[in-house]
Image: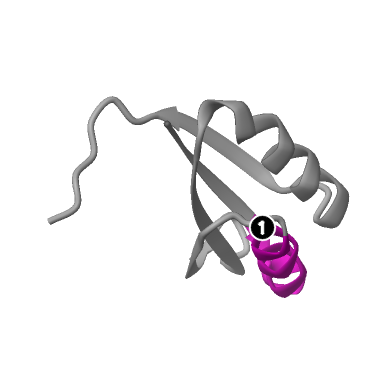
Amino acid sequence: MKLIVFVTNDGDADASVDALVEQGFRVTRLATTGGFLRRGNTTLLVGVEDSQVEQAHALLKQVAPGTLAITMDLDRYERL
């Protein structure tokens, strides 16, 4: 399992979430601020199976070019 953190600009956030949800991904959306000019960003947290990473990356590349993607292994996770 992987956790993908997508950081996109606010203008692309709605389309990004909609596209991910349409493809069956579960998304957690966080409003974030950062960068040199303190512009508004949106951070999307998406948990995916290893085989779905490329699909999620390609989707965001198409819908929101320039989005930062950070992909991390989830060695352990549990529902509390």
Secondary structure beneath disc 1?
A: strand
Question: Residue 31 location in percent, x, y?
Answer: 49, 72
Is 73 located above or below residue 61 in the figure? above
Q: Residue furthest left?
A: 80
Q: Count numbered badges in the picture.
A: 1
Q: Which residue is at 68% across, 71% downward?
A: 10
Magenta stretch contains residue 18? yes
Out of 53 and 45, give the one closest to the viewer: 53
Question: Residue 66 location in percent, x, y?
Answer: 78, 46
Out of 36 and 49, give the one closest to the viewer: 49
Q: Residue furthest front?
A: 24
Q: Which residues are magenta?
A: 8-22
Out of 35 and 60, give the one closest to the viewer: 60
Question: Residue 21 location in percent, x, y?
Answer: 65, 64
- Provide the major secondary structure of the magenta segment: helix
Q: Which residue is at 12% across, 56% downward?
A: 80
Is 46 located above or below residue 58 in the figure? below
Q: Quadrant of residue 20?
A: bottom right
Relative horizontal placement of residue 17, taking residue 49 as reference (left or right): right
Is 15 located above or below residue 80 in the figure? below
Is 2 located above or below residue 43 in the figure? above
Look at label 1 and name its amino acid. Answer: Thr
Mark 1 is surrounded, within 10 Å at the Cα level, by few (under 14), some (14 to 19) or many (20 or more) other residues, namely: many
Question: Residue 52 location in percent, x, y?
Answer: 62, 34
Magenta stretch contains residue 59? no
Out of 42 and 15, give the one closest to the viewer: 15
Q: Which residue is at 73% across, 37% downward?
A: 55
The image's colouring method is: one colour
Residue tagged 1: 8
| Image quarter hosting the N terminus | top left
